[in-house]
Amino acid sequence: MIKRCVIPPRRLVVFSGCAHYSKAGQIVAHGGFVREIELWARIFPKVLIITVAGTDEAPADAIPYLETGVSFSLLRPAAPTTGLIGKVRLVALAAQWVAAGWPLLQADDIIMARGPDSLGFLGGVLARMKMLPRFAKYADQWQPFPGEPLGYRLQKAFYRGPWFGGRVQIYGNRDPQRPHLVPFFTSSFSEKEWLQAGEHIDRTSDVPPWRLLFCGRFVPAKGVDLLLRAFKLLLESGTAAELDLVGDGEEMPALARLSRSLGIEDRVLFHGWLGRDALLQQYCRAHLFVSPSRKEGFGKVIIEAMAYGLPVLATEVGVSRFLVNPPECGVLVMADSHQRLAEQLIQMASQPGTRRLMGRAARVRARQFLFEKLEHQYRKFLMTHCGMSFN
């Protein structure tokens, strides 16, 4: 079991596969990750991030760290690990990671192992071997899902069982049989942004066309292909509608081709990644936010949409039920079914009054998940589950 501490250890060491990049003389990373780590940097005097160096250009949402006391150890990233050769490469690379990470760990460290990725898992193993205080955060869908990679399942087994020896934050429900698994929810949407969103929620008109909004990465897990097929059925029902897709990713060319093959390209707008002001405009003119994911972790973008008073149509994956609390703030459908998605789109299109009520409730509920509450939640987690006390 995790060591109990009277005061916080001097340093938090984070093992994570979230790639970091050098840009204009600064280390940058995915904005949500950076903002979260900066909260931990307000709790611990020092934070060391043991991570991998990005080999391509920094993503559009990458930002630098502003909090002092954050340092980095950038390791060689993993090559593709598919197939037998890929697994051999990963084993060889893991040996290099161990050689680099082991001497960095000190007796007064506490370890955060972030999953699901190989480096985070390795951090959990090293923390166990060195008997250091430790906890983990599994920042992806905790419940099983079709096509789940073997590596994900092995890491869940490690964290679910007695081998890790520490608390594990999960995006899932409490398990009475495994009290070391701690349901935990996060956010990157601030109180200031929530208040600003409130200035715009009454500006949406019910004058056609009915506008649907998706925001996220264009990857298979997000199910944008399902949304396009469901949207075609919505148009065939006679509903005047338009679909705004905000984001980018590996599937974008294929999705554009799919919209053309379905004959709906004139009703689908691919916006790419948008800055805050441009994204705000999309929220302001949308009538419904759609999250068609095949799998999902926490779904931060759902909170953001709800803060703008948008009802939500989402698939029942991850913690979407907890966020949307249907039918209070929206509707959930089974994952990986464009027919079910279309049925609910058609039904919600005919119920503007119900949508408005859901949107108002969504706005109120979103305030439960604001960024400013996280530091208090982190401190409470450390005191309640890791035996720490703070001066």
Image (spheres, rainbow, N blue to C red):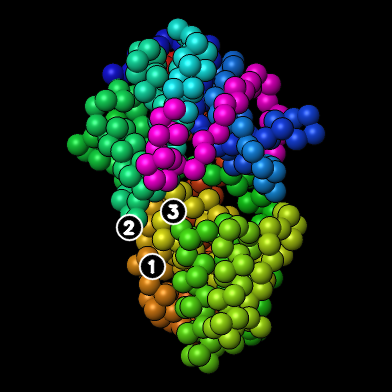
Instruction: For the residues labelled 2 and 1, say whether their Cβ atoms are less than 8 Å apart.
Output: yes
Q: Quadrant of the N terminus?
A: top left
As shown in the figure, which amino acid type bears the numbered disc 2? Answer: Pro
- Residue that label 1 marks: 336
As measured in the structure, the alpha-carbon distance from the residue carrying label 2 to the one carrying label 3 is 12 Å
Earlier sequence position, callout 2 versus callout 3: 2
Q: Which residues are magenta?
A: 63-92
Farthest residue toward the front? Answer: 85
**Spot occupied by residue 225 in the image (x, y as percentages of width and height):** 50, 70
At 55% from the left and 76% from the top, the residue drawn is 258
Secondary element under disc 1, as helix, strand or loop, is loop
As measured in the structure, the alpha-carbon distance from the residue carrying label 1 to the one carrying label 3 is 12 Å
- Residue that label 2 marks: 146
Question: Circle 1: is it few (<14), some (14-19), or many (20+) Cα within 10 Å?
Answer: many
- Residue that label 3 marks: 296
As shown in the figure, which amino acid type bears the numbered disc 1? Answer: Asp
**Spot occupied by residue 345 in the image (x, y as percentages of width and height):** 47, 78
At 49% from the left and 23% from the top, the residue drawn is 97
Above or below, 144 relative to 106: below
At 39% from the left and 37% from the top, the residue drawn is 87
At 42% from the left and 10% from the top, the residue drawn is 6
> Is 22 on the left-hand or right-hand side of 310?
right
